[in-house]
Image: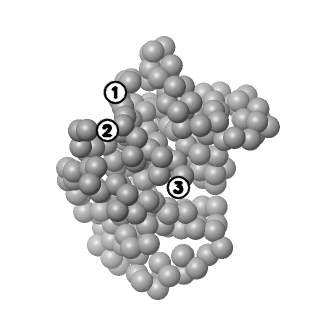
Amino acid sequence: MNGFGIIAACTKRARVIGQNGGIPWVLREDRDYFKRVTKDAALLMGRATWEESNIHLPHSRATIVMSRDASFRDSINKIPNVSTVSSFCEALDAANKLITSDTVAPDAVWVVGGEAVYERALTHSLVRELHLTEIDLAAEEEEKIISAKRVARFPSEELWSEMYSKLDTVEGAKSGLDGLPTYNFNRYIANST
């Protein structure tokens, strides 16, 4: 395996990736970017990400879902191109088997969430890159989101910023254009250890 990539979208200030079981914004451009980057890849995700989103899309070759709940694992193992494991290390092993069997390319493994999975992945020795869309919502809009009952966040830059170098930033829409918030696509490369 040539390592794995991480792809995420979060609010710029509070680092929110999810709210009450869903993504609290709609950005077609970000969804298109996600599909383009992860096309024909193996997607590694936690159970909540699987359950709370439509991230298990046909554009990927395989989906590996992490859960410690055996009955949950049994229930989705019947779905084509979906497998379950109980840990991040097992997910990497499963992805490596997909590479060995030529199901996915060696550089086509992507971690796609959620919060605990991102925390584990960001500091792992096999991570090679990070694609992070930052969404700059109006302060009052972001405040509404973080006051929700359940909020998931992307890990603070304090955890990972020294381990990565920014490659580039591509600006998305400006606030107010077509009702979209301002957002940026940021690419980082993991520093060699």
Query: In which quadrant will I find the C terminus?
Result: top left
Tell me the crowding category of disc 1: few under 14, some 14 to 19, or many 20 or more residues within 10 angstroms, Cα based.
some
As measured in the structure, the alpha-carbon distance from the residue carrying label 2 to the one carrying label 1 is 8 Å
27 to the left or right of 19: left
Q: Which residue is mark 1?
A: 2
The residue drawn where x is 55% and y is 43% is 45
Q: Quadrant of residue 5?
A: top left
Tell me the crowding category of disc 2: few under 14, some 14 to 19, or many 20 or more residues within 10 angstroms, Cα based.
some
The residue drawn where x is 23% and y is 57% is 170
Q: Secondary structure at mark 1?
A: loop
From the viewer's perspective, is residue 126 above or below residue 184?
Answer: above
Whichever of callouts 2 and 3 sits on the residue coming sooner in the sequence is 3
Q: Which residue is mark 2?
A: 128
Tell me the crowding category of disc 3: few under 14, some 14 to 19, or many 20 or more residues within 10 angstroms, Cα based.
many
Query: In which quadrant will I find the N terminus?
Result: top left
Q: Nearer the viewer, residue 68 or 24?
A: 68
The amino acid type found where label 3 is placed reads Glu
**Tag 1 near tag 3, CB within 8 Å:** no
The amino acid type found where label 1 is placed reads Asn
Q: Tag on residue 126?
A: none
Q: Position of residue 149 (x, y in %)?
A: 66, 73
From the viewer's perspective, is residue 156 above or below residue 98?
Answer: below
Q: How many marks?
A: 3
The amino acid type found where label 2 is placed reads Arg
Q: Secondary structure at mark 3?
A: helix
**Tag 2 near tag 1, CB within 8 Å:** yes
